[in-house]
Image (cartoon, rainbow, N blue to C red):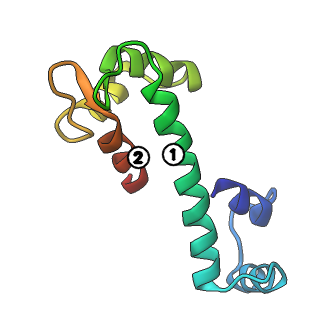
Amino acid sequence: DMGLWRELKGSNDIVDFFEFADWAVRQGLAGTELQHQVCTADARKAEALRVALSGLRGCEGGRVCVQDLRAVLKRLNSSLKDRELDLLFGPQGVGATDGNVDVAAFLDYLRLA
């Protein structure tokens, strides 16, 4: 979760391991608890995103039109370049077929990336 990282990092470019360990102990977090907390938050976000993407016009059978998804991503991040999106939806990325992307595969790809 980027929120946890921002909280810990503050305005620093790097974080000393001992500062991190102290922060985690003060938060009551150990390795597995921290990982569980982040994974739970990621799962909630992924489900919310799945629901939102499933509501896009033309999304049927868990698949969404690449052009619609490109438009959504560009709206969320206007600095995305077309070539970056080409890579994302190409064979090395999520692998769109017939101009459509499987929403579950797209979310899995984002989690692994």
Q: Position of residue 42 (x, y in %)?
A: 55, 55
Query: Looking at the image, which residue is at 32% across and 32% down?
Result: 62
Q: Nearer the viewer, residue 48 or 42?
A: 48
* Residue 98 x, y percent position in the rendering: 15, 20
Residue 5, numbered circle: none
Above or below residue 8? Residue 91 is above
Residue 66, image x and y in percent?
31, 20
Image quarter of the N terminus: bottom right
Residue at the front extreme of this rendering: 61
Q: Amino acid at mark 1?
A: Glu
Question: In the displayed structure, would residue 16 be above or below residue 11?
Answer: below
Residue tagged by mark 1?
Answer: 47
For badge 2, the amino acid type reads Leu
Secondary element at tag 2:
helix
Q: Which residue is at a point 58% across and 25% down the rendered structure image?
A: 76
Residue at figure coordinates x 63%, y 80% from the top left: 33
- Measure how far apart labels 1 and 2 are at the Cα level: 13 Å
* Position of residue 11 in the picture relative to residue 113 (left or right): right
87 over 10 or under it: above or below: above
Seen at 75% across and 80% down, the residue is 24
Q: Secondary structure at mark 1?
A: helix
Check the image and report above or below for 50 versus 6. Answer: above
Percent position (x, y) of residue 57?
42, 13
The residue pinned by badge 2 equals: 110
Left or right position of 6 against 46: right
